């Protein structure tokens, strides 16, 4: 005969049933099992042997993290090593807690989870999984609020450098001019047009400087009837006028005028309009022809520096300059070795060739020039040894020069390759207070667990225990 289990538990002490259920061994097993599963395991329920084998502090500090179905179990003390992160802060991770499964659930990229957990376990060692793209891994690190220094280190190891923070002008007019003069040509069409104009006038000015030195084209600038009608002077005046307008726009649109004026490109911009003004003043007020020619020669040399303005629009030129700057110690070592060899072989050549009639090695400093051009395998032929011992010394110098120059060159080439393959993150713009507040509000609204799954403080156990049988 089947008994009927009526009421809320049928007097057996088993909480709630769903109506009248036949009392059979199967129903008893199911209801008792469901009741036990709904209760948290208690430490006193474990046998004395289990309690002796596993200390109470061992199993109390374990938490379960579920990342898109992959369950990870770790110690609470491990997460607390970095309290400023999402997993290390109890208040931040509270909204991701699932009270039904008693675990923290994150709908995030699963392959990145183990690497992020290893960050806590290894006290800050961060390694990107091979199969995870760098951008995806970076987004996961930012979501779990890993410190920016660690993110910057792993991106630097992957060939990325942190973009510089650039200020934005406050007024609308300054911002429009700043977008045209200082932003990348890929960002704004007007910046591309302005960069093309700068390149054209720079090349035009440099070409006029070179052609101006040809005697048949230069003319006589010091004569009254030709000093302001010369075609090259007109080209220089137009170019200088454009450069003056360029400097004025950059100064007006720059959010930090002092920083721009102290920069290398800023100094080139400021000096690009200077030569034509000096030439005009000299031609009007100076009567001495020798002085005028000397000033014009100096100003021509100063105008040649305008070619460096092209580095603003050429990544290759910037890379070469940066590679040489980073290799300054290696270049200094090369110059020291070359200086030692120049002095040594110039002295040896002097003492070997000094008694030869009509010799060019009349002193050791005279032999410096010969030693230098021989070391770089250039050899003008203006100074040559005549004795057999002198020719032997010259051969040794040529071989020593090849070895000396060849040794540091691979180091410089390697650094150039590293800089060339390095990518830079987009520059971070320094936003105002209103924009910063909006960003902070957006971060606070980060989607977490549904409100129906967020339990109260009383129902969120920080400790996930293990059911020992």
Image: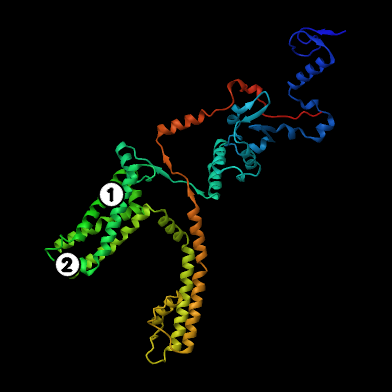
130 vs 435, nearest the viewer? 130
Q: Residues within 10 Å of mark 1 (few under 14, many from 20)?
A: many
Asked where in the image residue 363 lies, by quadrant, the reply is bottom left
Which color scheme did the rendering employ for the protein?
Answer: rainbow
Task: Check the picture and name the quadrant holding the N terminus.
Answer: top right
Which part of the image, by quadrant, shows the C terminus?
top right
Pointer 1: what residue? 246
* 10 Å crowding of disc 2: few (<14), some (14-19), many (20+): few
Q: Is residue 384 above or below residue 9?
A: below
Residue at image position (19%, 60%) is 231
Number of the label disc, if any, that sits on residue 90: none
Q: Residue at x 77, y 34 (%)?
A: 55
Q: CA distance from mark 2 to mark 1?
A: 30 Å
Vertical comparison of 209 with 313: above or below: below
User: Regarding mark 2 in the picture, which secondary structure is present there?
Assistant: loop
**Where is residue 347 drawn, in percent x and y?**
45, 83
**299 w.r.t. 141: above or below:** below
In the image as oriented, which residue stretches furthest toward the right? 1
Question: Taking 117 as reference, is 354 left or right?
Answer: left
Frontmost residue, 167 versus 61: 167
- Residue 439 at what x, y percent from top left? 46, 32
Q: Which residue is mark 2?
A: 220
- Left/right placement of residue 302 relative to residue 91 reads left
- In the image, residue 170 sits, relative to residue 156, either above or below, namely above
Residue occupying the point 39% across, 54% down: 314
Q: Position of residue 294 (x, y in %)?
A: 22, 68
Residue 122 spot, x, y in % from top left? 65, 44
Q: Earlier in the sequence, mark 2 or mark 1?
A: 2
Could you tell me how many numbered marks the image carries?
Answer: 2
Instruction: For marks 2 and 1, give the one nearer the viewer.
Output: 2
Q: Is residue 80 visible?
A: no
SS at mark 1?
helix
């Amino acid at each position: 005969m089947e008994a009927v289990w009526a009421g809320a538990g049928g007097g057996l002490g088993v909480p709630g049933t769903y109506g009248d259920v036949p009392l059979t061994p199967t129903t008893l097993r199911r209801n008792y099992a469901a009741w036990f599963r709904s209760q948290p395991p208690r430490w006193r329920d474990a046998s004395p042997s289990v309690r002796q084998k596993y200390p109470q502090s061992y199993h109390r500090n374990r938490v379960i993290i579920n990342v898109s179905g992959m369950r990870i179990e770790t110690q609470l003390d491990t997460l607390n090593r970095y309290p400023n992160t999402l997993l290390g802060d109890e208040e931040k991770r509270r909204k991701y807690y699932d009270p039904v499964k008693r675990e923290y659930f994150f709908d995030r990229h699963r392959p990145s989870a183990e690497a992020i957990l290893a960050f806590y376990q290894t006290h800050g060692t961060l390694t990107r999984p091979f199969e995870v793209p760098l951008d995806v891994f970076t987004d996961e690190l930012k979501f779990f609020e890993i410190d920016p220094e660690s993110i910057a280190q792993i991106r630097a190891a992957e060939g990325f450098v942190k973009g510089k923070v650039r200020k934005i002008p406050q007024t609308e007019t300054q911002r429009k001019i700043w977008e045209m003069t200082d932003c990348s040509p890929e960002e704004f069409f007007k910046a591309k047009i302005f960069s093309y104009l700068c390149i054209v006038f720079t090349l035009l000015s440099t070409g006029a400087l070179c052609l101006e030195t040809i005697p048949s084209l230069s003319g006589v600038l010091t004569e009254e009837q030709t000093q302001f009608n010369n075609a090259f002077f007109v080209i220089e005046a137009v170019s200088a006028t454009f450069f003056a307008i360029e400097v004025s726009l950059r100064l007006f649109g720059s959010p930090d005028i002092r920083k721009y004026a102290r920069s290398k490109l800023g100094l080139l911009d400021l000096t690009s309009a200077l030569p034509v003004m000096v030439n005009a003043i000299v031609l009007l007020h100076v009567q001495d022809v020798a002085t005028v020619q000397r000033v014009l020669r100096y100003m021509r040399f100063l105008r040649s520096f305008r070619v460096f303005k092209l580095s603003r629009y050429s990544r290759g030129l910037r890379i070469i300059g940066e590679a040489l700057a980073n290799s300054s110690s290696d270049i200094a070592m090369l110059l020291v070795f070359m200086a030692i060899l120049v002095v040594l072989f110039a002295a040896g050549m002097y003492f070997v060739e000094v008694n030869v009639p009509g010799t060019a090695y009349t002193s050791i400093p005279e032999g410096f020039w010969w030693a230098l051009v021989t070391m770089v395998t250039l050899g003008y032929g203006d100074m040559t040894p005549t004795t057999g011992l002198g020719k032997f010394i010259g051969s040794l110098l040529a071989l020593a020069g090849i070895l000396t120059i060849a040794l540091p060159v691979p180091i410089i080439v390697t650094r150039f390759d590293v800089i060339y393959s390095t990518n830079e993150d987009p520059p971070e713009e320094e936003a105002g207070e209103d924009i910063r507040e909006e960003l902070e509000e957006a971060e606070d609204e980060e989607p977490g667990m549904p409100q129906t799954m967020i339990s109260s403080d009383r129902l969120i156990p920080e400790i996930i225990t293990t059911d020992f049988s």
